[in-house]
């Protein structure tokens, strides 16, 4: 059983090694931690606010994942994501 199995069909936030922040419904994962996100969107943070870019169905290679976590749908719905101001994440160098 995969470590990601409890997150299947849940909304998750994924941070990639290149600093991207992706949110979507986890639909699948394989033995190399490649993941499929449905209704995926990228959150691009800046000092002017957060831009939300819809991506649709999205495949992320397992070797590009930094972390995956489940989102609290109630708290997520209460936030206005576009009003959040933050510096973008920098790329992680291995």
Image (cartoon, rainbow, N blue to C red):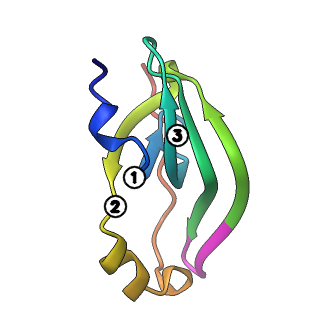
- Of labels 1 and 2, the one closer to you: 1
Q: Residue furthest top?
A: 31
Magenta range is 46-52
For marks 1 and 2 on the same chain, the one whose residue lies earlier in the sequence:
1
Quarter where residue 67 is shown: top left
Task: Check the picture and name the quadrant holding the C terminus.
Answer: top left
The answer to whether 39 appears left or right of 85 in the picture is right
Q: Where is residue 66 in the image (x, y as percent from the top left)?
A: 39, 34
Residue found 51% across the figure and 59% down from its top: 88
Q: Position of residue 21 (x, y in %)?
A: 51, 52
For marks 3 and 1 on the same chain, the one whose residue lies earlier in the sequence:
1
Q: Which residue position holds label 2?
A: 71
- What element does badge 2 sit on? loop
Q: Do the residues labelled 1 and 2 touch (CB within 8 Å)?
A: yes
- Of labels 2 and 3, the one closer to you: 3
Q: Which residue position holds label 1?
A: 10
Give how far apart the Cα atoms at labels 1 and 2 are: 8 Å
Mark 3 nearby-residue class (10 Å; few <14, some 14–19, many ≥20): some
Q: Position of residue 3 (x, y in %)?
A: 27, 26
Q: Which residue position holds label 3?
A: 27
Q: In this view, does 57 lie above or below 60?
A: below
- What element does badge 1 sit on? loop
Residue found 64% across the figure and 56% down from its top: 39
Task: Check the picture and name the quadrant holding the N terminus.
Answer: top left
Q: Are marks 3 and 1 in contact (CB under 8 Å)?
A: no
Q: Is residue 37 above or below residue 35?
A: below
Q: In this view, does 13 lie above or below 67?
A: below
């Amino acid at each position: 059983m995969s470590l990601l199995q409890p997150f299947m069909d849940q909304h998750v936030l994924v941070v990639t090694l290149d600093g991207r922040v992706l949110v979507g419904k986890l639909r699948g994962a394989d033995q190399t931690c490649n993941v499929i996100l449905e209704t995926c969107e990228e959150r691009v943070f800046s000092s002017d606010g957060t831009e939300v870019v819809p991506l649709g169905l999205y495949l992320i290679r397992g070797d590009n994942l930094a972390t995956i976590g489940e989102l609290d749908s109630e708290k997520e719905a209460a936030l206005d994501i576009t009003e959040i101001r933050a510096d973008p994440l920098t790329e992680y160098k291995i």
